[in-house]
Structure formats: structure tokens, C-alpha cells
Amino acid sequence: MSHLKIKWTKSYISCTQDQRDTIRSLGFKRLYQERTVKNTPEMRGMVKKVMHLLTIVEDVR
């Protein structure tokens, strides 16, 4: 199964509460942290919801 490496690059100040919850559910605890998540439809949906706050570093195979 492939994975996505994502990085939290922008603060969620002035974002809605559901976007804040999505960042936390992706596993981020602090700004500029990198996470590797499974490339499933559920994860891609969460990443798409907060895409303006994240950077996709690479698609890990």
C-alpha cells in the first residue's frame, strides 16, 4: 500500500473548528511537523479538506 508524506506548513488560526479537528486527527501536534499516512480514500479526504494548510512532500511507495 502506498503512503503520503505530508507537512503542516500554515497555522490554523482563523480556521473553522472542524478544520482544526482534521489537522489533529491527521496526527499533527505542532507546526512544520511531517507525518506519513496511508493513501486511503478517508485520508485523502481529510488532506483535501485542509489542503491550504498542508504541503505534500512526496508519495511514498
Image (cartoon, rainbow, N blue to C red):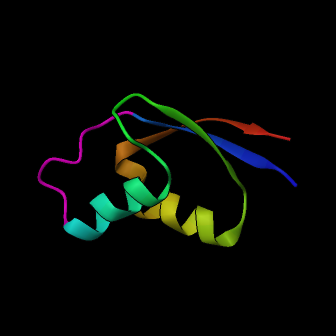
Asked whether 12 falls inside the magenta stretch, the response is yes
* Quadrant assignment, res 35: top right
The residue at 62%/71% (across/down) is 42
Q: Residue furthest left?
A: 14
Q: Can you say whether 25 is above or below 11 in the image? A: below
Apparent side of residue 20 relative to residue 32 in the rendered image (left or right): left
Q: Say how many tags the image has.
A: 0
In the rendered image, the vertical position of residue 44 relative to residue 6, given as above or below: below
Image quarter hosting the N terminus: bottom right
Left-right relation of 8 to 5: left
- Magenta-drawn segment: 9-16
Please determine whether, in this image, residue 27 is positioned above or below residue 20.
Answer: above
Residue in view at x 35 percent, y 49 percent: 52
Image coordinates of residue 40 in percent, x first then y, are: 72, 65
Main secondary structure found in the magenta portion: loop
- Where residue 4 appears, as percent x and y from the top left, is 68, 45
Relative image position of residue 5 (x, y in whole percent) = 64, 38
Task: Check residue 21 for magenta coloring.
Answer: no
**Residue under the image location 39 percent in, 54 percent down:** 23
Residue 7: give x, y in percent of width and height.
49, 35
Quadrant location of the C terminus in the rendered image: top right
Left/right placement of residue 41 relative to residue 46 reads: right
Residue located 50% across and 54% down the image: 26
